[in-house]
Image (tube, coloured by chain):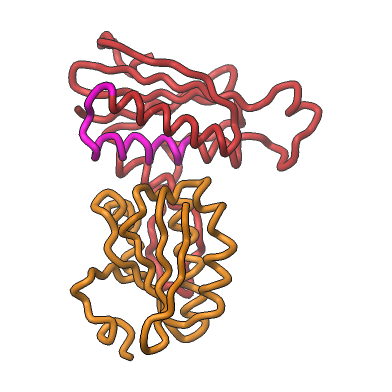
Chain colours: A orange, B red
Amino acid sequence: MKLETVDLANGVTKISLAGRLDIQGALKVDGEFAAIAEAKKNIVVDLSEVTFLASLGIRTLIVGAKAAANNGGKLVLLNPQPNVESVLRSSNVDTVMPIINDATPLATVFGA
Amino acid sequence: MPSSSQTAETGWRRVFGGSIADVTAASAWVERIAASLKLPGKLTFAMQVCLEELMSNIARHGKVHSFPTETDADNPLSISIDIDVLADRIAMTIEDNGRPFDVEKAPAKVVDQPLEQVRPGGLGINLIKSFSHNIEYRRTDAGNRVTVDFMR
């Protein structure tokens, strides 16, 4: 499980995850992911390179989304692979973290 | 064992421990079996989701005590997995010697509140029920047995 961060324009931070966000992957990135979410406001999590997601990984994302919301911002999920997206949607995670794709203007998402 | 009297065409069995590394190893094992059977990626993914949720539940909650005790050392968590290939489905049976947990009756929780009120965690049971076609639980003398079916 890899995690990379880059600051985009308008105060948006992109966190790119790659690999399996399973129990082992989630435990590996939990601390760093939460710390970034606590320090930032508007976050895009790029899931395009995440090949697997289960409930412990969803937990990681929800903790981050709550931290961003506490800062007055939001966390959105970018380009999940179809299987990963089906995990998100069957858990109703998309009701609290919008799922967007490359065609979605970030200005619309964050109102920036 | 298959969940019905239908005879398995072929099958695999392996025993794992109850550590997080075991969950990862079991998932890789299931992936190799799925590849050898040339199962569609979606089906392989569904099997891995159910396996991960069932095994990580056992690994995290299977023992009564949070920390190893003398009793745990004498009787460590053991998780056996059977993969049986039937004419119309794949049956994955997971048996453990942990404390009783009826996954079939456990509530399938989804996110149903605004973000501020969502408590992280607890979404695994719904994933098992969403990604399998049938789930059957039986309490055994040693612990628990769960069979999840996936239509081929």
Image coordinates for residue A39, horizontal then vertical, percent: 55, 79
Who's the residue at 30% across and 32% down the image? Answer: B134
Image coordinates for residue A104, horizontal then vertical, percent: 21, 76
Query: What number of labels is visible?
Result: 0
Is residue A38 rendered to the left or right of residue B47?
right
Q: Is residue A15 above or below residue A51?
A: below
Who's the residue at 71% across and 42% down the image? Answer: B66
Q: Is residue B9 above or below residue B19?
A: above
For residue A12, what is the image quadrant? bottom left
Q: Is residue B56 above or below residue A26?
A: above
User: Is residue A106 or residue B3 the one in the foreground?
Assistant: A106
For residue A102, what is the image quadrant? bottom left
Who's the residue at 31% across and 65% down the image? Answer: A94
User: Is residue B116 or residue A103 the one in the foreground?
Assistant: A103
For residue B51, what is the image quadrant? top left
Overall secondary structure of the magenta stretch? helix
Q: Quadrant of the C terminus of chain A?
A: bottom left
**The magenta stretch spans residue B40:** yes
Q: Is residue B139 visible?
A: no
- Residue segment shown in magenta: B36-54
User: Is residue A109 or residue B80 the one in the foreground?
Assistant: A109
Q: Is residue A9 above or below residue B6?
A: below
Is residue A108 rendered to the left or right of residue A72?
left
Who's the residue at 31% across and 59% down the image? Answer: A48
Q: Is residue A97 visible?
A: yes
**The magenta stretch spans residue B66:** no
Image coordinates for residue A20, horizontal then vertical, percent: 42, 48
